[in-house]
Amino acid sequence: MNFVRRAMIPCCCGVLLAGLFVARPLAAQASQAPAAAATAAAPAASQSPQQAYTLPADKLAKAIALSRIRNILDIAGSIWGIVFLWLLLATRGWAGIEAWAQRAAARRWVQGVYFFLALLILTTLASLPLDMYGQHCERAFGISVQGWGSWFGDQGKALGLTLVIGTLILLLFNWIVRRWPRCYWFGVWLVTIPILLFFMFVEPVVIEPLFDKFEPLAQSNPALVQQLEKVVARTGTNIPPSRMYLMKASLKTNGLNAYVSGIGATKRVVVWDTTAGRVPDGEVLFIFGHESGHYVLHYIWKGFAGTVIALFFVYWGCAALAGWMVRRFGSRWGAAELSSRTGFVVLLFVISIAGFVLQPAANAFSRHFEHQADVYGQEAIHGIVADPQKTAVAAFNHLGEAWLEDPNPNPFIEFWLYSHPSTEHRAEFAAHYNPWANGGHGEFFAK
Ligand SMILES: [Zn+2]
């Protein structure tokens, strides 16, 4: 899912920011791979005794090394995406492609199709080396078990989706800029809303099945489904067993995960097959409780509303900055006006910068919602599992070990890149959260 979003970043500005807000997997580092061995967590003495999330010494060293690689790739990927757009502006590369498209086709919209196909293919190719290196590392560290053939297959599918959907969206946005040169940002914002809703709705039924196999959870894990129904009853979420799916993640990864996706008629819970049956059911219930929290507490809609409100100001600001850039550098870059194809790349360039700069703000909101969902998850399993505190801490240790999460990430990295609080912070909170002591009750449930 994240994989698809990343692939769509260059093509859909709305999705770019939406990806930072809407439904997310529980694992902070959702990318690839599972770990059957992860169920045998054996904390070692190499971390301070008060840590709630610990790793055995060998895994600790690996986690620190892999986290460093992931962080560098994350930041480098964002910056490289921006630099690449700029490089082809500065060398008049985009202007050259625009001239080629004009020679190649007579109709204006066909020229647009050529130009945007070229733009999407080039930006995808530009990010490919970093993506490949990331996949290489995930494999080397035993997180990903996906072969290169399958991996390139996924990349190809993502590119295909990007080309079809991205070209249409970019043509529409570019047309709006031409049609309403003064207040186009408002028009783009207006059409972004239904586009986002549409993708949230179709993602689990149209996009996710292109990349992974799903089957009813009850088919392989009937006892787990029965347990999950207890949490459903306690939380009042209307998710029947027919909306609970098992994803065959083990074909690609050793990582653990469960998530909720879709809206309305497509809303569903997905548990990875690396998680169901491999970690104790109580921990899956906790993860499910966390995910339910996103829905019960309306985080999906709050996140959506937050995205839409933020985009209003982001588009407005980006339009002003892009307009200035075209006046200042337009002749040098071959972008006569903002409504030209090359001018539109200037707008994409500015939006990419905004996305990067605003990432910490989006992540701060996300971390807040994720923390609330953790609280909710722990309260949701109260009375269903014997010890919610222990269960939650164990779940975080399994998740952290499976993904090789750094137990002590740099606070600045956590602030900038983490959409979830660090595993240590989450486990630490869970270990001390016991509102039922002395007859009290939690924040979200009356008992
Ligand atoms: Zn979450």
Image: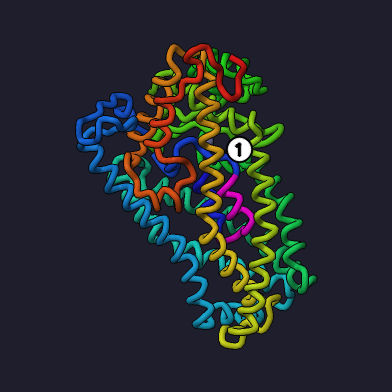
Observer-nearest of 423 and 200:
423
Q: Position of residue 396 (x, y in %)?
A: 39, 30
Which quarter of the image is occupied by the C terminus?
top right
Residue at the (34%, 30%) spot, across then down: 52
Q: Position of residue 91 (x, y in %)?
A: 49, 82
Residue at the (56%, 55%) spot, across then down: 8
Residue at the (37%, 24%) spot, across then down: 394
Residue occupying the far bottom of the picture: 331
Residue type, mark 1 in image? Pro
* On screen, residue 215 above or below 110: above
Q: Is residue 281 visible?
A: yes
Q: Is residue 254 visible?
A: no
Whether disc 1's CB lies below 8 Å from ligand 1 is answered no
Q: Which colouring convention does the figure follow?
A: rainbow
Q: Position of residue 159 (x, y in %)?
A: 53, 56
Assign a secondary structure to mark 1: helix
Q: Which residues are magenta?
A: 10-21
Q: Position of residue 211 (x, y in %)?
A: 51, 42
Q: Which residue is mark 1?
A: 204
The crowding category of the residue bearing disc 1, from other C-alpha atoms within 10 Å (few below 14, some 14 to 19, many at least 20), is many
* On screen, residue 376 above or below 6: above
* On screen, residue 349 above or below 143: below
Q: How many marks?
A: 1
Residue at the (49%, 17%) spot, across then down: 221
Tell whether 167 sits left or right of 38: right
Observer-nearest of 297 and 400:
297
Is residue 33 covered in magenta? no
